[in-house]
Amino acid sequence: MFTADDIVHSYTRAEAIEDGYLVDVSTVAREAGFTVPVAMTRAAWVDCVEWTEHTAKRKATIQDEAGRLWDVVYMARLAARAAGGAQQRRFQVYRVPTEGRGIRPRPVVLVLAIGPGDAGEPVITIMQPGED
């Protein structure tokens, strides 16, 4: 018989990164001033960072993944500073949407969540509202 304390299955952060559900952005995050590991959900990555050659040709605007990632991580860093100890903080990023033909930056809200990693260490996850 199982009790509420019995763990039937766990899915680690490391497994989520290995499987591609999370994208480790810690290297760029360290450049922006983060001192703990940072990852983004795949959905947040696709919406705010991903920029393929096909998208670049179709949009005919100057964008690249490195610049888009820096924008997200930098704004997340500002949100972390303003979090005041809160476990979650919403922040806004302007990005050119990959869908459609428009090239005007549009705002999107992301969430910075601070929580325990696989070994209980502090980690940060950047995600879309409604993700967990």
Image (cartoon, rainbow, N blue to C red):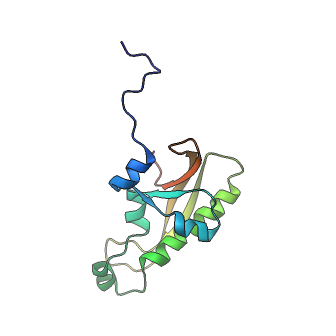
Q: Quadrant of residue 41?
A: bottom left
Q: Is residue 96 above or below residue 123?
A: below
Q: Pinpoint residue 90: horizontal percent, then vertical percent.
A: 57, 54
- Pick the residue in front: 129 or 85: 85
Q: Position of residue 50 (x, y in %)?
A: 38, 70
Residue beneath the point at 58% across and 59% down: 91
Residue under the image location 33 percent in, 53 percent down: 19
In the image: residue 28, left or right of residue 48: right
Evaluate whether residue 16 shows in this view. Answer: yes
What's the residue at 38%, 48% (across, down)? 15
Quadrant (top left, top right, bottom left, bottom right) of the C terminus: top left
Residue 105 appears in the rendering = no
Pick whichever, 29 or 56, lies toward us.
Answer: 29
Place residue 119 in its image quadrant. top right
Q: Is residue 7 above or below residue 13?
A: above
Quadrant in which the N terminus appears: top left
The image shows residue 67 at horizontal and vertical percentages of 49, 78
Spot the residue most to the right: 84
Residue at figure coordinates x 38%, y 57% from the top left: 43
Asked whether, in this view, residue 122 is left or right of residue 41, the answer is right
Q: Nearer the viewer, residue 132 or 4?
A: 4
Residue 35: x and y, percent?
Answer: 64, 60
Residue at the extreme front: 119
Q: Across the whole image, how many numbered discs are drawn on residues?
A: 0
